[in-house]
Image (tube, rainbow, N blue to C red):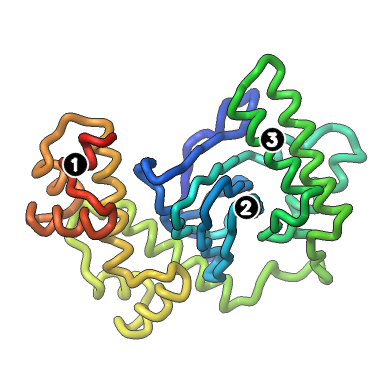
């Protein structure tokens, strides 16, 4: 079955250094991490507060000092609380050294023969301290930092393996997951892709459930199990995040932004914006 795309497709860093750094706090237009996926790996480091992450439908509460290791193609999102966090998104293939001693371990990750533990608590300092150093190195960008980051990433993976913070797949030749879970992931990606492509237009629950070929009631349960949001709540929240970016980065009027992001009523847009952001659109723009 084809794997449908809602995924981030932008280039990660540069061709020479394929790693992207994101610092996120309450002022970031995408402070709430919307459910998404990408083919790259991601390391999330929690600086302060906490974030309730949802990884392929499973909850994972990460607190200050914790590290979350997100594998390729894992559907993930999160609900932060007074949180600051950093996301390092990278193409692990590009970091695969020609050295056989390194390649044999990274190949196991790329082939999903082993999976690094998703939540690595701060008590596992052998790993979390290295990630903290890696975050600081990328943020400072001193001369030669790229070389340091390569080495630190290898250290993170090596420390996780040496501390046993991974699981090994017993039967490498079998499918990665059960048929039902695999189909669910495909369907949720298909629905979220549709939302991403059509959020400027009216979207009904019946449209979304039809994409998944489910009844409205069953679809609502299915969608909530993956995203921990109702379908319409997810649509409106995504629209508000898109509106936040326009308020920060354009001079468009609030009314124009409301219509551009799928709201056909300016007063309802303001009400929804305040619900999700905690401020009116105008106040949000002034504080940006």
Foreground pick, 129 / 102: 129
From the viewer's perspective, is the residue at label 2 or at label 3 nearer? 3
Q: Tell me where residue 131 appears, x and y as whole percent.
A: 70, 42
From the viewer's perspective, is the residue at label 3 or at label 1 nearer? 1
Secondary structure of the residue carrying numbered label 1: helix
| In the displayed structure image, the side of residue 56 where residue 121 appears, left or right | right
| In the displayed structure image, the side of residue 15 where residue 28 appears, left or right | left
Foreground pick, 142 / 64: 64
Quadrant location of residue 55? bottom right
Residue neighbourhood size for the residue with mark 2, other residues' Cα within 10 Å, grouped as few (<14), some (14–19), many (≥20): some
* Residues marked 2 and 3 touching at CB (< 8 Å): no
Instruction: Please give the residue where the numbered disc 2 appears in the rendered image.
Output: 72
Secondary structure of the residue carrying numbered label 2: loop
The numbered disc on residue 134 is 3
Quadrant containing the C terminus in the rendered view: top left
Q: Earlier in the sequence, mark 1 or mark 2?
A: 2
């Amino acid at each position: 079955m084809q794997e449908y795309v809602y995924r981030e497709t932008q280039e990660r860093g540069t061709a020479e250094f394929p790693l992207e750094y994101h610092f996120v706090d309450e002022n970031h237009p995408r402070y709430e991490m919307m459910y998404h996926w990408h083919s790259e790996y991601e390391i999330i480091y929690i600086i302060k507060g906490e974030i309730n992450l949802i990884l392929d439908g499973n909850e994972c509460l990460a607190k200050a000092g914790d590290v979350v290791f997100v594998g390729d193609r894992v559907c993930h999102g999160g609900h932060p609380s007074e949180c600051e966090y950093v996301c390092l998104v990278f193409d692990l293939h590009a970091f695969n050294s020609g050295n056989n001693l390194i390649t044999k371990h990274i190949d196991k990750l790329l082939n999903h023969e082993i999976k690094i533990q998703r939540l690595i608590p701060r008590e596992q300092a052998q790993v979390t301290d290295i990630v903290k150093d890696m975050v600081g190195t990328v943020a400072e960008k001193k001369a030669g930092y790229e070389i340091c980051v390569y080495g630190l990433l290898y250290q993170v993976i090596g420390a996780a393996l040496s501390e046993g913070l991974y699981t090994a797949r017993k039967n490498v030749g079998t499918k990665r997951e059960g048929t039902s879970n695999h189909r669910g992931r495909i369907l949720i990606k298909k629905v979220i892709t549709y939302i991403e492509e059509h959020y400027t237009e009216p979207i009904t629950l019946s449209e979304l459930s039809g994409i998944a070929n489910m009844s409205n009631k069953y679809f609502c349960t299915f969608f909530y199990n993956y995203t921990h949001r109702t379908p319409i709540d997810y649509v409106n929240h995504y629209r508000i995040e898109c509106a936040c970016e326009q308020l920060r980065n354009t001079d468009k009027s609030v009314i124009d932004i409301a219509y551009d992001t799928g709201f056909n009523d300016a007063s309802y847009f303001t009400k929804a914006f305040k619900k999700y952001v905690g401020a009116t659109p105008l106040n949000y723009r002034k504080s940006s």
